[in-house]
Every structure is written in C-alpha cells, then in structure tokens.
Amino acid sequence: MKARGSARGPLRYPAAMPTISRKAGSFAESVIRDMTRIALQHDAINLAQGFPDFEAPQTLKDAACEALQGGINQYAITWGARPFREAIASKTRRWYPGWAVDPERDITVTCGATEGMMAAMLGILDPGDEIVVFEPFYENYGPDAILSGAVPRYVTLHEPDWSIDEAELRAAFGPRTRGIVLNSPHNPTGKVFARAELELVAALCVEWDAVAFTDEIYEHIVYDGEHIPMATVPGMEDRTVAINSLSKTYSVTGWRVGWVIAPAELSSGIRKVHDFLTVGAAAPLQAAGVTAMQSPDEYYEALTLEYRVRRDLLVAALQESGFRTSIPDGAYYVMTDIRDLTDEDDVTFTRRIAAAPGVAAVPGSSFYAHREPGRTKVRFAFPKRHTTLEAAAQRLRAIRST
Ligand SMILES: Cc1ncc(COP(=O)(O)O)c(C=O)c1O
C-alpha cells in the first residue's frame, strides 16, 4: 500500500487501511446464522437454525422472573453461581452414576456451549497442537480450533450410517495430537456414537495422551441407542472436557447459559480464559438453571417423545418431496441428499428454496472442511411446532414441480 502525503509533506507512517487478523480472515461467517437472515428476507419457514419456535417451559420462565425480581442482578462468581454448579453436579450424578463431578473444582458455567467449547480450547490447546474433528461437523469447531491456534485434522464419518473408518481415525492421531472433538448426538447427522466407537476414541486418547472435548448438548434428545458420556468410558474421566448447555434440553437457546465439566487441572485453564472472555453468564438465568436441573424424569421423557413425532413428520415430508434422507437417532436435524431433485449445488439449491417455495435449510458443504461431499447435501432442523412443520411439508412438496 502506498504512503499518503499532502502539501505539508509525507505522513510519518504509511497510512494503510486497518485490517482484520489473519485468524479472523481465515474463516467465513456462520452459514447457519446467514441462512436465518435469508429466511427473514424471504419470509421463509426457517428450518435452518436449530432453535425452537415454541415457548420455553413456564416453570423456567417463572424461575427467571423470580430471580430478576428477587435481586439476583449482579455478577455471579465468575465460574458460576454455586447453587447452579451444585445443581449441575447432582443432576449429572443422577443421570450418570459413577461420574464424580466436584462442583467446586470441576465445573465452569459459560455463555452457552459456544463459549464453553471456545474457552476450553483456548484454555487447553497451544498453537501448533493438533485436534481431531469428525467431518461433517458443527461449523463452530473449525473457527474454535483456528482461534486457539490449533490445527484441525478432519476424519470423515462415512455414509450411509456415518461410520468411523478405524484406520483413518488412527492415522489422524500422532505426537502432536492434543485433543479430539466428539459431538454425540451429532449435529448435523443425528448419529449417536455407540459404545464401541467411544472406546476406540478413548483408546487413542490414552495412547496419544489427548483430551476429548465432548459436545453433549443433545444428550436428552435420543430416539435410538443411548447417550454415553465419554467421561464414563473407562480411562476417560481425567481426560474429558464435557460441554453442555441449557439451550437445547430446556428450549432456551437465547439464554446463553452453558457449562463445562473437566478435571480440576484442566478446569483451572478454562476458568481463566472464561473470566477474561465474558466474566460470567447471566446471573438470574443461572438461578433459573437450578430449576431446570431439578426437572423430573417425565420432563426428559416428554421432550424425547415430542421430538420423535417432529422427526417422523419432517422425515416423511422430505422423503415424499424427493429428498434422500438418513434417519437421525438423536439431536434435531435431518441431513438429506438432493441428487434426486436437482443438479444444482447445495448453496444454489438452498438459496432457491428459501426464496420459493419459502423453506430455509443449511447447505451441506458448510459442515465440511473439504467442501465437495457436502455439495449434494442439505440439512433441515425440526425443533418447530407441528403447524410449522406441516406448513413446511406443504411447501417442500412444491419443490419437485419448480
Ligand atoms: C452441536 C452444537 N453445539 C453447540 C451449539 C450451540 O450451543 P449454545 O446455544 O449452548 O451455545 C449448537 C447449536 O446449534 C450445536 O448444534
């Protein structure tokens, strides 16, 4: 860039335009959040971003109002209000007996799982460390790794059942491997990792002294199989960083409250990063989180049951409309193959159907580092009212004729 000058002589410093960092320049804006903007622009039914269009549980809203009115309006302790950490620990023990979680040392409350993953990677990884990420992946993990200076090593989950090729996974581990990201139930495929798969990952983590960063925010949305927390797999409790959140289980994605459970040594790094990133999550919503953690078993049973109905509704509608789909075992997304419907790539197709007939979805390539396998795929989300899904189904049927 040329130095600017004036009649009074040259400026003392070359006046280049300020630029963003190489880190920020090396990843794109979120495609998922972008599709939400496109949905709004076309008044499309938004099956792109995974958030409910139905109300949060009344008990939680009441608890949040009570906390606000009751004076819980100042900073909580940076790593989380004690009653909330205690409630998280006792809920974790209730669901997964044997997983010893110390609320004083092992838990950091964060602004959603999003901050949880970011703070965990920043607190544990060093520049140049390698981190294994299964592909397709939830799009945040790439930028999370880049921001923490780590190098992602992608390992493909193979269709039709999104299985792991053991040789490929083994080949991704090496002396620089410091961690692996594991998201089960999985976004975008709905895969629920089986015990044997977790044991394979665990064996490699032990062999290479790596940490499992597990994103477990869909733990209670499982239709087939069971959610097995990595921390409960033998040998893994001391090398698992379990990330979770209120967002999905309690239908409060806007509250931005999550948490990380990790051994005390790792938690100390996560807590420091978290403190300087955000100081803390919203105090009154942490108070309401105690009520969430005390939800009875029936709450979780109803949640899964309701999501199963929504899943079946959307899968049937997609199949009738000409999409090839895999049927998710967990989480609330359907990954589809569009090759029977169009020759367009995923981005062109999703933009077209958002405009008309007006259904927003996410281009499959945004879940792949090597974009190609995603070009024929599109992801739909179903945390929506039945009426929304039925209206979407009606519109989807129009795609074939356009
Ligand atoms: C796998 C996964 N992790 C994390 C998040 C974000 O979670 P939170 O709202 O707790 O930040 C999402 C949201 O869609 C997700 O699908």
Image (cartoon, rainbow, N blue to C red):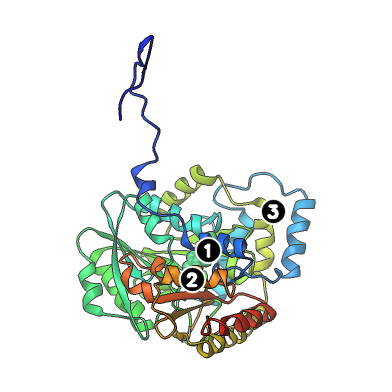
Q: Are marks 1 and 2 in contact (CB under 8 Å)?
A: yes
Q: Is mark 3 within 8 Å of ligand 1?
A: no
Dot 2 crowding, Cα within 10 Å, few <14, some 14–19, many 20+: many
> Quick one: label 2 or label 3, which is nearer the N terminus?
3
Badge 3 is on which residue? 284
Name the residue nearer the viewer: 195 or 170. 170
> Quick one: label 1 or label 2, which is nearer the N terminus?
1
> Quick one: label 1 or label 3, which is nearer the N terminus?
1
> Which of labels 2 and 3 is toward the front?
2
Q: Is residue 260 above or below residue 305?
A: above
Question: Which secondary structure lies at badge 3?
Answer: helix
Number of the label disc, if any, that sits on residue 35: 1
Dot 1 crowding, Cα within 10 Å, few <14, some 14–19, many 20+: many
Residue at coordinates 38% horizontally, 68% vertically from top-left? 365
Q: Is mark 2 within 8 Å of ligand 1?
A: no
> Which of labels 1 and 2 is toward the front?
2
Q: Amino acid at mark 3?
A: Pro
